[in-house]
Image (cartoon, rainbow, N blue to C red):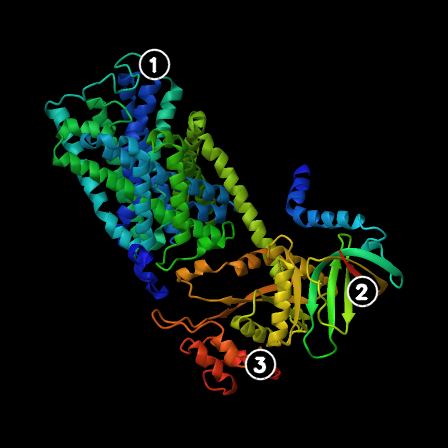
């Protein structure tokens, strides 16, 4: 049993450590809620790191979509009307605030055109 | 190339039947194991009785009685095995017999014991063969390289066996015959001179004979039995013929049975004669020179005859190892067929031999040689217990068969097999008890361990068979929800090919994925993707630790959340610079790493789309990089260069708008948007 625990710790430590690191960082940002505790249809302010960025092909309305993680969970941010925001790139940390809407079937939140501040 | 030289051309399956051997080759191939033991069995008895009793004279005096007991045992076993051969013309020996008549567990015991013993045959025979060579006074200096010599011999026999049994039979037929005749000649001369002439015994050298008194000491029943167990190793290999009946020419059973009789007669008389001669010539056991070598030098001197005999001894011992090479792979293929060993042991290699079994045997024997320093006497106690266990099981199985089938003559047959079973069972017990502390414990531990492995393998195969079993009503169409992710390292021709391939699967979602380690890279990729106007959504994932695999995995987890219940295919564009090219070293094997990492992920397919870049021939001018790109409107779906080895890159780019026969269909997706540059 102890061995299994040790094995577990050794095999998952990378992802786990990364999550802890992010959580620690976001805790120090004043006035933010962890993403996991954010409620839909409420004004929320969260901090996090951009884990991925989506570039939608030319056809259709231009938009920029990023996934932000803070170690407790993730949410999707969509900025419409533009394809590129200087400084919004994978790995960048930021604070965003806006009204969350459920995104997809699994209760994940998304923020449409939130206010943002790069950290 | 190397393989062709060493192993030979592949043989077609229809050449199989030619791999059958006549009796005169069958004798050396299958009985060299048994006959070769005359080279060391007497010496091993002497090691036990003389060293144990600290008395050479006492040890020598017990030699002939022990040899008689062994000869009687040999006769019993031979007659029992003759019946087995006729009853089982398809071979399989102990394993088959006990499986059929005693049940699964006894058959596994027989199988495991035999496998262990075959490995020991190789180890003991090569070490004894090397001992024969370093006994020659001129080669004494090689004694310290014992282990390496043994390993070289094992490698040699392994290669010969990978070529196939018939040829190896021919290669090896002659040493056996030379051995039989030269040893027979030496013994005849020796015995004649002993009884009708004058001959001096081997000079006793107290320094070389390892704490051995010439007279005095004492010997008890335990030592006698231990000595007998050492002599009983002469019997190992008797079963080889019954295992290998299918390798004989037709009529297989009759030929095999005749060969068995020849073998036992030769083995019995040589062994007995060696022991009688030793009794008179008084050789002493030492690791420096074999007993046989000591006696030959007294009888026939150091001349060419002696050299022939020593090399023939080494030769037949190598052949004895070869016997195991014929049988171990065959037995393991039988076991594998029943699902107790990995399926790979069932496959015949391209030379029609069970290559995996051959290689496995070689490795196991080499390990034993290294572990025991290549000393025969150290290996002997491990030996024989397995053989006698399998003898016992096989004979018991035959008794059971006679009693149930009651064919003509079943009464006498039952008696023969019963006596055989009882005698060999007792011997197995004697070997196990008297030698437990000096090595017999090894097989006693290893055999049950192997049986557990057999069982575990069987359990796995059975569970897998249940899990894979398909019922007709389960055959129905089920449309997959399919997401295809094309992994992009940078924008190049291969990406286009991969994207087209991905589109041809008509996925529900098609994405391109780029893993960026810093912002600059991400920005650059973003700009490139827009500039080339790819019509596929690109996702840029951040890799904080500059690693490819982990970010891809966590991204896939996200995809699983986004669209539940779908199958994800990851398409990796891969350059192919030829599997044999050294240029492979210039390309990271990231595709391979990713495949390995994702192999455990359910509903995930990792595939790579090969792209064959047209590399300029050596000496030809290399067009400046980027020229082709700037000359032509850039866009996503140009089938440049793919699978067209003959087309130079620059001209290929101009073929875009004029489709011709050279354009591979697969890379021309319908409905792609025109260039927008």
Q: What residue do we see at 36% from left, 50% from top? A: B244
Q: CA distance from mark 3 to mark 2?
A: 35 Å
Query: Of marks 3 and 1, which one's residue comes earlier in the chain?
Result: 1
Residue B191 visible somewhere in the drawing: no
Badge 2 marks a residue whose secondary structure is strand
Q: Position of residue B390 (x, y in %)?
A: 43, 40
Which disc is residue A110 wearing?
2
Q: CA distance from mark 3 to mark 1?
A: 94 Å
Q: What residue do we see at 43% from left, 37% from top? A: B386
Tell me where residue B616 sits by quadrant. Answer: bottom left
Which disc is residue B669 wearing?
3
Q: Nearer the viewer, mark 1 or mark 2?
A: 2
Q: Chain of mark 3?
A: B
Badge 1 marks a residue whose secondary structure is loop
Q: What residue do we see at 68% from left, 41% from top? A: A5
Q: From this view, report whether residue B612 is shown above or below residue B443.
A: below
Q: From this view, report whether residue B354 is shown above or below residue B202.
A: below
């Amino acid at each position: 049993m102890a061995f299994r625990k040790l094995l577990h710790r050794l095999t998952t430590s990378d992802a786990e450590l990364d999550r802890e690191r992010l959580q620690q960082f976001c805790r120090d940002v004043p006035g933010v809620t962890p993403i996991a505790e954010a409620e839909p249809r409420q004004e929320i302010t969260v901090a996090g790191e951009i884990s991925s960025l989506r570039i939608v092909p030319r056809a259709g309305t231009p938009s920029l979509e990023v996934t932000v993680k803070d170690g407790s969970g993730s949410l999707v941010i969509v900025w419409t009307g533009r394809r590129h925001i200087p400084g919004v790139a994978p790995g960048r940390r930021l604070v965003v605030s806006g009204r969350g809407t459920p995104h997809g079937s699994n209760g994940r939140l998304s923020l449409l055109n939130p206010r943002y501040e790069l950290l | 190339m190397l393989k062709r030289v060493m192993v030979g051309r592949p043989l077609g399956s229809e050449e199989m039947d030619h791999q059958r051997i006549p009796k005169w080759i069958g004798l050396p191939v299958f009985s060299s194991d048994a006959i070769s033991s005359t080279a060391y069995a007497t010496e091993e008895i002497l090691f036990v009785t003389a060293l144990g009793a600290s008395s050479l004279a006492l040890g020598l005096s017990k030699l002939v009685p022990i040899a008689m007991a062994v000869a009687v045992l040999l006769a019993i076993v031979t007659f029992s095995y003759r019946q087995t051969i006729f009853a089982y013309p398809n071979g399989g020996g102990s394993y088959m017999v006990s499986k059929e008549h005693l049940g699964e567990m006894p058959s596994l015991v027989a199988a495991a014991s035999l496998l262990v013993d075959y490995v020991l045959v190789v180890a003991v025979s090569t070490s004894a063969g090397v001992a024969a060579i370093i006994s020659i006074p001129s080669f004494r200096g090689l004694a310290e390289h014992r282990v390496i010599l043994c390993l070289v011999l094992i490698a040699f026999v392994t290669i010969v066996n990978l070529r196939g049994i018939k040829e190896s039979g021919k290669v090896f037929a002659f040493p056996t015959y030379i051995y039989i005749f030269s040893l027979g000649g030496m013994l005849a001369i020796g015995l004649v001179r002993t009884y009708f002439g004058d001959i001096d015994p081997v000079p006793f050298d107290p320094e070389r004979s390892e704490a051995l008194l010439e007279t005095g000491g004492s010997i008890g029943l335990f030592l006698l039995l231990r000595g007998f167990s050492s002599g009983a190793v002469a019997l190992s290999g008797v079963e080889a013929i019954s295992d290998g009946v299918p390798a004989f020419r037709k009529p297989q059973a009759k030929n095999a049975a005749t060969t068995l009789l020849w073998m036992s007669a030769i083995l019995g008389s040589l062994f007995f004669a060696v022991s009688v001669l030793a009794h008179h010539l008084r050789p002493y056991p030492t690791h420096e020179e074999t007993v046989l070598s000591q006696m030959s030098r007294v009888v026939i001197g150091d001349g060419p005859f002696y050299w022939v005999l020593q090399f023939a001894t080494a030769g037949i011992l190598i052949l004895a190892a070869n016997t195991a090479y014929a049988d171990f792979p065959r037995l393991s293929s039988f076991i594998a067929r029943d699902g107790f060993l990995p399926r790979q042991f069932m496959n015949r290699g391209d030379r029609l031999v069970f290559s995996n079994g051959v290689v496995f045997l070689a490795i196991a024997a080499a390990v034993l040689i290294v572990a025991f320093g290549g000393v025969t006497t150290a290996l002997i106690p491990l030996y024989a217990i397995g053989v006698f266990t399998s003898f016992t099981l096989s004979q018991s199985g035959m008794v059971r068969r006679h009693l149930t089938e009651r064919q003509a003559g079943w009464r006498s047959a039952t008696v023969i097999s019963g006596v055989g079973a009882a005698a060999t069972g007792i011997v197995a017990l004697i070997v196990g008890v008297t030698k437990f502390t000096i090595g017999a414990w090894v097989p006693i531990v290893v055999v049950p361990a192997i049986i557990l492995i057999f069982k575990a393998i069987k359990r796995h195969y059975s569970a897998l068979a249940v899990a894979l079993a398909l019922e007709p009503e389960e055959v129905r169409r089920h449309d997959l929800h399919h997401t295809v992710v094309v992994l992009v390292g940078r924008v190049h021709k291969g990406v286009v090919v991969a994207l087209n391939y991905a589109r041809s699967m008509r996925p529900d979602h098609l994405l391109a994925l780029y893993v960026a380690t810093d912002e600059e890279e991400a920005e650059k990729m973003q700009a490139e993707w827009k500039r080339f106007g790819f019509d596929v959504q690109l996702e840029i994932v951040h890799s904080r630790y500059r690693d490819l695999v982990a970010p891809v995995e966590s991204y896939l987890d996200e995809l699983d959340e986004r669209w539940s219940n779908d199958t994800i295919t990851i398409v990796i564009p891969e350059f192919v610079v030829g599997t044999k090219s050294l240029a492979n070293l210039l390309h990271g094997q990231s595709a391979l790493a990713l495949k390995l990492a994702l192999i455990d992920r359910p509903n995930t397919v990792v595939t790579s789309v090969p792209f064959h870049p047209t590399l300029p021939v050596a000496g030809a001018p290399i067009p400046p990089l980027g020229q082709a790109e700037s000359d032509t409107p850039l866009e996503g779906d140009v089938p440049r260069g793919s699978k067209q080895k003959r087309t130079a890159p620059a001209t290929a780019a101009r073929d875009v708008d004029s489709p011709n026969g050279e354009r591979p269909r697969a890379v021309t997706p319908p409905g792609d948007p025109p260039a927008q540059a």
